[in-house]
Amino acid sequence: MPQEERGGWTVVAGAFIGTACSATILVPYTFGYLVAGPASAMGWDRSDYAPAITVYMLILLVLLPLAGRVIDRVGARMAAATSLIAMAAVLTVIGASVQTLTGLMIGYGLLAVAAVGASPLSYARAVTSFFDRRRGLALGVALSGVGLGTALLPVYVRTCIEFGGWRAGYFGLAALLALVVAPLVWILVREREGRAHGEKALREPAPHSAPVLASVTTLHFSKMFLSVFLLGLGISGVVPLLPGILEDRQAPADVAIKIQMCLGISSIVGRLAGGWLMDRIYAPWVTALAAMAAITGLLLFMQVGHWGVIAALVGIGLGLATGIESDVIAYLASRYFPRGVYSSILGLMVASYIAGAALGPVAFTAGEKIAGDNVWWIISACLLIGAMLQLSLGRYRPQD
């Protein structure tokens, strides 16, 4: 193992911890538990407070591409650690002062602004600075921290709330970020010397926009941007509708829970397997594998009967696809674009994927009204087109 890669595994460990509490995981997976208390105390209905998470996701979607440029300038460690401290401060203020719906909306809007630096963009930049030959595996291990956060953060928040009430949920989460995660990220996450351009970019800010503009006007960028949008629409866009879809098909009530469990476990497996495969074969072929896994899961919804087996297969298919594709996006951004604009490009790609996932439920319900069960074939076609666009990218660019 090369010396630089050996040192990089401590960075992977820090990135694993960081992604477990990243902006795209911590808030969505704890929101329902944190807001249930004040909603009950203030007499809010679900339709009253639900827009707060929408505000958070929309602001995050808008800011991620801009955050990528900031991360490219100041460096991964500074961006992530500062953002984690800022998130802790905002969570503390929300927990101490929220009394109105307007205050809740403003609080979660500010939380989105604070959280952008703690997105996977920062951690992916640090990891890719150390790894070349094992880059896929390193990214897979680092980003699988998402699975840990998905499983443990709700349990942690519920425990805090049971101990001290709903405000303790916010305070406990803030303490976790400020006293545990941020220090570990600061100690463990760094960029390889000679590849961290943050300080140089701060001294010479003017030329920075030119490489970004040159990159986003390439055919490679256009293909990847459209590809990840279609993959987000097909892989992640259907998941929020699972309970309603299953109810319409008269599936037992616990089938949706089984699918979610299989999806979570399989997403971790998909991240690790996808990372391992990308170090050995052309990465777009791994995307094709992810698309086929998702298509298999989606088309199984057209079946009825043995829901136990079908639930497991649907969850495994969508989970593998979710895990694999998150790795592929970060990997391809590092292989086709200059390192100096890596976080900027990755921010745009992640924003495209999130946009597809956000539009997915709307597109699916509209397609279902028009085409009935044929909507499953339409979504599958979107996944195939997304995979084919990546397969047409051609050779990787020479590495910096």
Image (tube, helix red, strand yellow):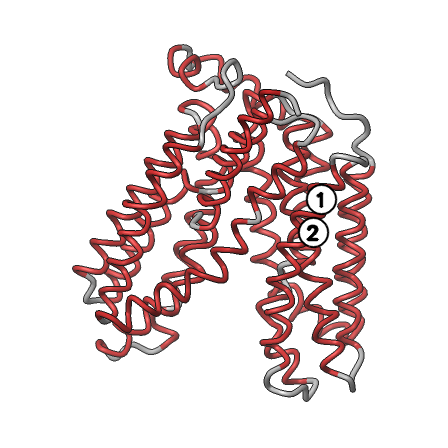
Give the SS element for disc 2: helix
Query: Can residue 250 be seen at all in this image of the molecule?
Result: yes
Above or below, 270 relative to 378: above
Three-letter code, disc 1: Ser
Provide the residue designation for mark 2: 231
Q: Which mark is residue 227?
A: 1
Above or below, 244 relative to 200: below
Specify the quadrant of the image occupied by residue 137: top right
Considering depth in this image, is 142 or 259 the residue closer to the camera?
A: 142
Identify the residue at horizontal 38%, vertical 76% (top origin). 46
Residue lying at the far left of the rendered structure: 97
Q: Which mark is residue 346?
A: none
Identify the residue at horizontal 44%, vertical 43% (top origin). 18
User: What crowding class fits label 1: few (fewer than 14 Cα within 10 Å), some (14-19), or many (20 or more)?
Assistant: many
Specify the quadrant of the image occupied by residue 85: top left
User: What crowding class fits label 2: few (fewer than 14 Cα within 10 Å), some (14-19), or many (20 or more)?
Assistant: many
Give the SS element for disc 1: helix
Circles 1 and 2: CB atoms closer than 8 Å: yes
**Horizontal and vertical percent position of residue 231:** 69, 51
231 sits left or right of 261 in the view: right
**Horizontal and vertical percent position of residue 209:** 50, 20
Three-letter code, disc 2: Leu
